[in-house]
Image (tube, coloured by chain):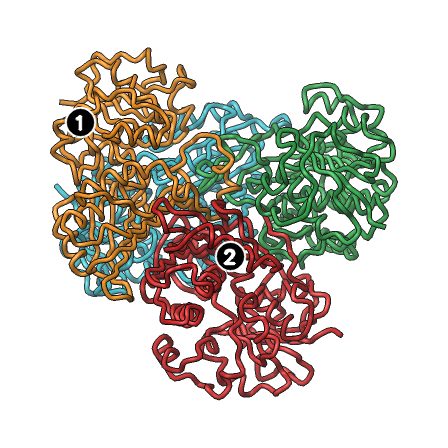
Chain colours: A orange, B cyan, C green, D red
Amino acid sequence: MTKKVAILGASGYTGAELVRLIHAHPDMRIVALSADRKAGQAMGEAFAHLGHLELPLLQKIEEVDFSAVDLAFLALPHGIAHDLVRRLPDHVKVVDLSADFRLRDPAAYRKWYGREHGAMDLQPQAAFGLPEIYRERIARARITANTGCYVATALLPLVPLLRAGLIDPDGIVIDAKSGVSGAGRALREASLFCEANEALSAYGVAAHRHMGELDQELSQAAGRPVCASFTPHLVPMSRGMMATIYLRGDAAAAQAELARQYAAEPFLRVLGLGKIPATSHVRGSNRCHIGVVADRTEGRMIVVSVLDNLMKGASGQALQNANIMLGLDETAGLTQVPLFP
Amino acid sequence: MTKKVAILGASGYTGAELVRLIHAHPDMRIVALSADRKAGQAMGEAFAHLGHLELPLLQKIEEVDFSAVDLAFLALPHGIAHDLVRRLPDHVKVVDLSADFRLRDPAAYRKWYGREHGAMDLQPQAAFGLPEIYRERIARARITANTGCYVATALLPLVPLLRAGLIDPDGIVIDAKSGVSGAGRALREASLFCEANEALSAYGVAAHRHMGELDQELSQAAGRPVCASFTPHLVPMSRGMMATIYLRGDAAAAQAELARQYAAEPFLRVLGLGKIPATSHVRGSNRCHIGVVADRTEGRMIVVSVLDNLMKGASGQALQNANIMLGLDETAGLTQVPLFP
Amino acid sequence: MTKKVAILGASGYTGAELVRLIHAHPDMRIVALSADRKAGQAMGEAFAHLGHLELPLLQKIEEVDFSAVDLAFLALPHGIAHDLVRRLPDHVKVVDLSADFRLRDPAAYRKWYGREHGAMDLQPQAAFGLPEIYRERIARARITANTGCYVATALLPLVPLLRAGLIDPDGIVIDAKSGVSGAGRALREASLFCEANEALSAYGVAAHRHMGELDQELSQAAGRPVCASFTPHLVPMSRGMMATIYLRGDAAAAQAELARQYAAEPFLRVLGLGKIPATSHVRGSNRCHIGVVADRTEGRMIVVSVLDNLMKGASGQALQNANIMLGLDETAGLTQVPLFP
Amino acid sequence: MTKKVAILGASGYTGAELVRLIHAHPDMRIVALSADRKAGQAMGEAFAHLGHLELPLLQKIEEVDFSAVDLAFLALPHGIAHDLVRRLPDHVKVVDLSADFRLRDPAAYRKWYGREHGAMDLQPQAAFGLPEIYRERIARARITANTGCYVATALLPLVPLLRAGLIDPDGIVIDAKSGVSGAGRALREASLFCEANEALSAYGVAAHRHMGELDQELSQAAGRPVCASFTPHLVPMSRGMMATIYLRGDAAAAQAELARQYAAEPFLRVLGLGKIPATSHVRGSNRCHIGVVADRTEGRMIVVSVLDNLMKGASGQALQNANIMLGLDETAGLTQVPLFP
């Protein structure tokens, strides 16, 4: 039976991407779209590339009728979901693309987001939303906290290696690079074409908020505190994300473990030892490709992980989580072949 | 019943795009892929973004077994199809993405391509492949000559207007702009990133080969010789094509005629009078959007037509033609929502 | 003797470009920089690429001491210069990069800018700032109204041809394309990287404000009213502007006239008949290159004109005008070789 | 007195960049340009952006009259300089932009370049060409081996820190990113616009040839063998290079040492502790900017170094070396303010 979903925050890039995906989903239908400041407009006014689709008008959140909604995607800024989820009817499942339900420790939430977690009572209902790692928990959860794009890119290779004890949890270096869509559609000087084009910049060095989730999940996987070096960079392209990860451990063993672990995963591909993926290999798809290379120094290796930040890093992952939560085929609506060039 | 197709010339961008599309087609299956210089390789070696798909190995054309092939896509350089089609078994239908079967007049072929047409005997079996204009002829054809991307972008608005006598056939100006993928994957200096990036250039001014088909089709539609001004430009983007067309005629009448003509077309959208489309509205899709604006001078108008040169301008159009020729749903495999950003 | 200049509106791209140029000028020194909302900041905070230069702090305009200023560059939004120029001391010459003093006819100003011209008494002191056309008037002017980038690109080829009677003033089509920096540093959705990247759009079709100056100058050159078709496009590159112009007239005669007219101009280059320039040939320089090609239809031709919109289209042209007004070598500070790639 | 120079290999990007720079040099004149396959052409045919300059015609190297040449820039592929330098008259000084004279150890040369060093007798005359580190040696050298762009970006921050013993020589991670012009103008599929645009890729992981010079110089600075992890990436922009370097040591001490060391350097800028440079801050200039940030983990830091790969990473550095070798002002011809946007 077709599941009915609402997308709250449909006027941002991740909201539009959800529309693109769900419009082609065989068992899901969009029954409500919200965008407070654009309420009353057609989706095609906010995003001309969706103008030919039949879609509900944009509404204010409080105007949405949730009575027939099976699941709501929250593509809203950080800090809104705590209150909002509390106000939703109990039968509505939630995939939250913000960071609001990612951190299980209220102290960590306070540290990284500068204020109190507003819904600690709901937090135990929330699964951390990386299906390849937490699939069963997601299947039972009412709320899934979608993983941030940077963290997803890093965790997919790192969690299995830490769990298997194949890498040294100390001294991990994650050099991360993102396309500009990761910054969203908000009007910021750094997001202007002329600022980002023909430019490469690092930002939030040693201070990016997503380190909170990174620490939580790496430590969980290692069974002890892990504090990696992490530097995000802004790359002049719209989509795409790469993590180049420097590790101590045996490259061949790591590659074999990842290949084994992910052999049956529909969206993951572990390349042969020494092969390296590029972001263009996965653009527009829900895929994550991982390459492992032995470094020149004995006992060191380099892992490269790529995904499309709006897909596997955000909306694609969200739909995958929703499919799991709703008991649908996990790959439904997500089988796009990458778009190249 | 699933139709079996071969893609000859699979190592170029249009070949790869056909693979992307047909892989998701419910009633079509790729049984052969050719690429002479890469024969023996997997498709994933030529195009890493297709590396996770199950596909036949690349072969030389002469190694392909056509006995079970229903239709062959020819994504080959100009000048090869004349001989090749003659050598194919009669039961194999052909969609030719080259210019070889586009010109019905051997003198025109000689003029624009500098040599004799090598298969004038087969030419009568060939339909000109713009489905919105020649759908019925395509349905009966053994060979369909896919329209070139520039010409498709211009003909879709111009043919109905000329047929309806709503525009002056003299003094038509077509200022055309293409993304770099229009030049293909061949190694040319002008196609290098550093040459095309941060650069805009006009080329082939008053001399581009595609003028042959343009003249033929505009004249056919007008019922008298038409010779438009046409300037192609290279724009620093991978995909996308726009024709900005300057015409004499009444904008409101033109918009109304186009809207009427294309109301039921699944891939065409005629915007409201005064609205203008952008290439990003159709990227990755098989769509063509058309806008009509009245110029400041009474009796003059400006028409803007956009499409994705690899899709509606090449491989998407080719698949649409193939669907028609094979009696399949014309939109099968072609319902992708545009990818933005 | 070194001339002292102020740049008012230094926090935009044209202001920053003036700083870049004047810093290397042998006979000019920046004594004041204004940027109201960033007053008190160093220029390097607004533009990191200028952070290593010794420059005055940003001030509010009313804080600037104009007593020793020989010339002020006004790189401000449209609508401010009328009042501002009135408040400047008489000894301060002005190069205004806005449109405020470009239109000599108050009715035209009202039509295109939707309000009254606020300084018609000063308008007679203002020269139209295209040095190759109005050099002598600029030399005597107190105010020079810098030509807009689109209009400069079109006028440089068109004015000599109209004056010489070599082209038909009716039916001129100007298809214009601009890099994104033409939209300035203001925060607008259309200027975001993800909106402009991999996208080509037309805008302001038949309605762009710069048509006022275009009409004025083309009509002046032709000695009768001229109303061209003009469509601006936004191209995914930071810098660069091209006008592709469709005309009736003899290409060879036109090329010869332009070559003769501009033979001694330091910044203009008229290519041989049939040769076409690209924007990358002039990037970062104060140059304008012009190509003339005969169209296929007898008596029609295509002219392509390119420049860097921030240089010859704005700040380079402004400095050239200032050099003329101050009696300096016209090319001082403007001899940069284009930057490629 | 004006020095006379030849540029051998003028048809590549570094050759063209040398022409751009030297054309504006007050005390240097280009008397010969070579490009074997384009011999007889004007430079403007190879590079249209130089078409308005008065320059010698392109010649074959053997046609060049070196009798009046003071210095030759060798902008040739690797492997040619050994023989060529031997054939040049003794009075001709050489700045070699290839790797041929960078490695002092013939075994290292053999390892990284797969063949014997062809001019070990000349090697002692060759200085390693990073002026900020080897200025005095360069002043006395007949041959200067220009440092490769990746290695220059990394050495400028690392050498002073290793010499001062402020960082741990073990476990250094250099994550390096380059614009596409680093690959030159050669026709390679990976350099095509459609391959590099909207794509980020790592390449030569743990295997890039430039590691030979990196090892040599880091070991020299540390006084013991150093073997860093080094991963180059290709970024979709024409110019620009960044090294993000992960180190053990005290960030504040490192920043202070670099600031002290480079205080008087005309082209280097060490930012305040915690500040990070972007490639767009130095584009088109001969500058290198360095930022130092303390990592979250006590005793770890991140250093970001940026330059323009064609300028400080190649041709700008080469001209700086030539100025030193010829006794000219080291900054002559190199004071361009960065071009932004």
**SS type, badge 2:** helix
Image side of residue B38 versus residue B187, left or right? left
- Where is residue B38? Give x, y as percent: 27, 64
Say few, some or many: other residues with alpha carbon within 10 Å of mark 2 (under 14 / 14 to 19 / 20 or more): some
Q: Are discs 1 and 2 both within one chain?
A: no
- Where is residue D48? Give x, y as percent: 60, 60
Whether residue A178 is visible, yes or no, is yes
* Residue type at numbered disc 2: Glu
In which quarter of the view is residue B157 placed? top left
The residue indicated by pointer 2 is D257
Whether residue B148 is visible, yes or no, is no
Where's the C terminus of chain B, which quadrant?
Answer: top left
Given residues D179 and C22, the one toward you in this image is C22
On residue B33, which mark appears? none
Chain under label 1?
Answer: A
Residue at image position (62%, 65%) is D44
Image side of residue D254 versus residue B145, left or right? right
Given residues B224 and D97, the one toward you in this image is D97
Residue A140 to residue C235: above or below:
above
Residue at image position (37%, 32%) is A13
The residue indicated by pointer 1 is A27
In which quarter of the view is residue A140 placed? top left
Given residues A104 and B326, the one toward you in this image is A104
